[in-house]
Each structure stands twice: as structure tokens, then as C-alpha cells.
Amino acid sequence: MKTKDEQRFSTPTPIRLDIKIPAGDIQLTTSDSGESVVTIDAEQKVLDEMRVEFVGSHLTVEWRRKSLFNGWMHHDNALNIRVELPHHSRIKISNVSGETILNGEYGDVDVNTVSGGVRLPRIVGDVTLKSVSGDLTADSIDGSVSVRSVSGDVSVEKLHGGRVEVQNVSGDVRLGVAQGINLDVDASSASGEVSSELPLSDVPAEGADGPTLVVRSRTVSGDFRVVRAA
């Protein structure tokens, strides 16, 4: 049976959050409440192996065993972590599998996963993802994006500028561009299709007034597509 552990910390300013777990679902959100709240749902034997520590401005949530996999696979529905933290905090997440959902305003986000999916309903900040087969799905990103993946798909419904860098082997890339954003695109795929609803160029339009979205994408067999965001 799952139980809940909740811990609260006074955090009037942005913090650094590190989460390191072998597997589990993670949900983060930012607020101006002046505190950080860590809620962990798991069986008691899993909770006993978790460490939640706040030192200075650094909040750590991690699996304490030296080996991430030692004993972990004996737990069913192992872990669900929810964290509320201040706007503009910096995030680093390492896990093997499980869904990661982030909503809010961050200084930067760094996710390293094997097969876990990353979903961003609405995020302000820079995002870095390293993955083998996990997908990145985002409704809206106001910041830069860097993705290195083997077979994970990248889908962003709306980008507001910044820089997007994607290196992929077989995953598809779909990028939505907000109204009023200019494009500077250099994209290629060895055997996939490259297409766009907008003119593609490696040079922004002369005299363009709005911000520029710089896109650099390389895939082997995945498709690359740019669309106009709704």
C-alpha cells in the first residue's frame, strides 16, 4: 500500500533542485508561495530509501542506495514525486523510466533519461534533454531547447524564439512557431522528410522586426517538420 510523505522548506528565492531516481513519475510546478513542497507517494519500504535534503539553496531528492537498481525492481508502482518550488529555480533530473511533467518558469531544466517521456504543458526557461527513447512533448516553450536522442520524438506546439538544437537518429521532430517569430533554420535528414509550412532559410528575412527562432536539427531517418502554431 502506498503512503505519502510531505516535507516543506522556506524558499523565498529560487533554488536548485536535483532529483535522481531509477524509475518513477515526476511532476514539478513553480509558484510564488515562498516555500518548496516535496510530496512523495510510495510504499513505505521505498520511502525509507529516499533522501530529501535542503542545504543552503540546494534541494535534493534521491534514491539513497549506492546501486540505483539494487532491489528497485522488487517494488510495484514504485514512486511518484511532486515538487512545488519558486519561479526561476534550476532543475536537474536523472531517471531511467517514468513520466516527467514540468509546468512553470525555470532558470533552466536539464533532464537525463533512458526511456522516460518528458511533457511540458507550459514552460518558461531553457530545456536540455538527453534521452535514448524518451519523447519530448511540449505545449509551449519560451526559451531555448537542446535535445540529444536516439529514437525519441520531439514535438513542440509553440516556440516563442530562442534556439532549438536537435540531434536524433530515428525520432521525428515537429516544431510549431508562434506568430511574429522569424526563422533561421538549418535542418537535414538522411532518409526522412524535411518540410515546412513556413519558408525555410539559413538567414532571417531582411528587415524582419520580431524575434528570431534559430533551429539546427540533424536526424538520420526521422522526419523534420515546421508548422505555424495556432
Image (cartoon, rainbow, N blue to C red):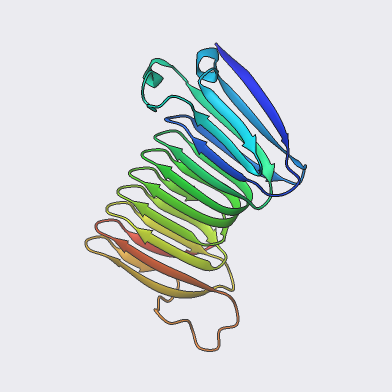
| Residue 163 picture location, percent across and down | 48, 67
User: Which quadrant is the C terminus positioned in?
Assistant: bottom right
Instruction: Tell me if residue 229 comes above or below residue 13 in the rendering.
Output: below
Instruction: Tell me if residue 136 comes above or below residue 224 in the rendering.
Output: above
| Residue 210 picture location, percent across and down | 60, 78
Instruction: Tell me if residue 213 comes above or below residue 63 in the rendering.
Output: below
Q: Quadrant of residue 198?
A: bottom left
Identify the residue at the far bottom of this view.
207
Front one among 79 and 63? 63
Instruction: Tell me if residue 28 comes above or below residue 128 in the rendering.
Output: above
| Residue 201 picture location, percent across and down | 40, 78
| Residue 182 picture location, percent across and down | 52, 76
Q: Quadrant of residue 48?
A: top right
Left or right for 49, reference 89: left
Identify the residue at the far left of this view.
191
Front one among 70 and 124? 70
Front one among 80 and 50? 50
User: Which quadrant is the N terminus positioned in?
Assistant: top right
The mark total stands at 0
Identify the residue at the far top of this view.
1
Q: Residue at x 50, y 20 (%)?
A: 49
Q: Residue at x 58, y 75 (%)?
A: 211
Q: Residue at x 40, y 75 (%)?
A: 200
Q: Residue at x 55, y 33 (%)?
A: 61
Left or right for 151, reference 228: left
